[in-house]
Image: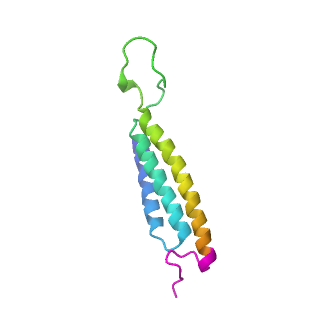
Amino acid sequence: MELILSMGIGILVASGTWLVMRPRSFQVIVGLCLLSYGVNLFIFSMGRLRTAAAPILPKSGEIDPTAFTDPIPQALVLTAIVISFATTALFLVVLLASRGFTGTDHVDGKERQ
């Protein structure tokens, strides 16, 4: 499971980095989204991957912290998802305004001849 997760994170970050270096604004925005997804998965994986475990603590007895996942990375990822959604919406509005003013979606504002 860890190998699949690390490969998924690597593919998301690599393709996001490649798209960020493209000359079109829409490709840059998609690349930033892929980078944020890769970082979110990385942060989420820092809380330990655990399957078939109880999400709540028992009422009595000793508590073994290694039997439970850390909730802090999960809360960070939920916050990051909301923030990345808002910034993506802002980037799309800026992209549409820039395309309306310049007539092109190139990052530098002009087509290559």
Q: Main secondary structure of the magenta part?
A: loop
Is 90 situated left or right of 54 in this image?
right
Colour approach in the figure = rainbow
Residue 29: give x, y in percent of width and height. 53, 63
Residue 38 falls inside the magenta stretch = no
Q: Is residue 95 above or below residue 68?
A: below
Q: Is residue 50 above or below residue 61?
A: below
Q: Nearer the viewer, residue 1 or 82?
A: 82
Is 104 situated left or right of 47 in this image?
right
Residue 85: give x, y in percent of width and height. 56, 52
Q: Nearer the viewer, residue 84 or 1?
A: 84
Q: Is residue 106 above or below residue 39?
A: below
Residue 66: give x, y in percent of width and height. 36, 26
Going by the picture, which residue comes out furthest to the right? 100
Q: Nearer the viewer, residue 33 or 53?
A: 33
Residue at 36% x, 24% y: name it: 65
Q: Nearer the viewer, residue 21 or 81?
A: 81
Residue at 37% x, 18% y: name it: 63
Q: Is residue 107 above or below residue 13?
A: below
Q: Which residues are magenta?
A: 100-113
Residue at 63% x, 75% y: name it: 100
Quarter of the image where the N terminus is located: top left
Residue 92: give x, y in percent of width and height. 59, 63
Going by the picture, which residue comes out furthest to the bottom? 113
Please tell me how many numbered marks the rendered image carries: 0
Residue at 61% x, 71% y: name it: 97
Quadrant housing residue 60: top left
